[in-house]
Amino acid sequence: MPQLDEPLTITLSLEDSRLVRERIAENGYRDAEDVIHDALSAFEPDESEIEQWLRKEVIPTCEELDRDPTQVVTLEELDRHIAELHAKTVAEHNAR
């Protein structure tokens, strides 16, 4: 297995090779390495977006629940609430 600091040589299936060649021809990539790099980059989350989400939504919600734990809903309560909403929606649909 190659070390993390060594280049990696891979073999693509015929279908994947065709897709890479199409991207080079149609999208102006220089070579297969650029296509693969671009594709792999799509897997990396944008850290700034995740950081913003954590700061704006997750942290304030956790802090609020720490201040007032009575707001926490148990799984059983959530299941019951969803079942009630579902039953109401079905009843309304059947009443039409």
Image: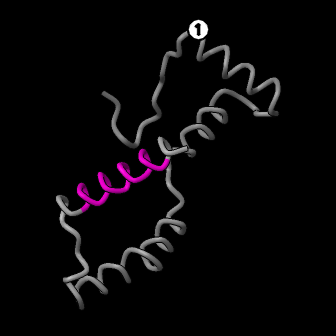
Crowdedness near tag 1: few (<14), some (14–19) or many (≥20) residues, C-alpha within 10 Å: few
Which residue is found at the position 44% from the left and 50% from the top?
89
Q: Residue at x 23, y 75 (%)?
A: 72
Front residue of this view, candidates 90 and 32: 90
Q: Residue furthest top?
A: 14
Q: Is residue 72 magenta?
A: no
How was the colour assigned to the protein in this rendering?
one colour
Relative height, residue 19 to residue 53 (above, below) = above
Measuring from the top left, give residue 42's x and y in whole percent: 57, 45
Percent x, y of residue 36:
59, 33
Q: Quadrant of the C terminus?
A: top right
Residue visible at 76% across and 32% down in the picture: 30
- Left or right, 40 with respect to 30, comes to left
The quadrant in which the N terminus is found is top left
Give SS at disc 1.
helix
Task: Determine which quarter of the picture holds residue 80.
Answer: bottom left
Return the residue nearer the eye: 94 or 54: 94
Picture coordinates of residue 5, whole percent (x, y): 40, 43
Q: Main secondary structure of the magenta part?
A: helix
Residue 5 to residue 35: above or below: below
In this rendered view, identify the residue nearer to me: 70 or 2: 70
The part of the chain drawn in magenta is: 78-92
Say which amino acid is labelled 1: Leu
Q: Circle 1 sits on which residue?
A: 14
Numbered-mark total: 1
Question: Per the image, is 83 magenta?
Answer: yes
- Horizontal relation, residue 89 to residue 75: left or right: right
Q: Is residue 22 above or below residue 4?
A: above
Considering every residue shown, the one lying at the far bottom of the view is 67
- Residue 50 on image: x %, y %: 47, 66
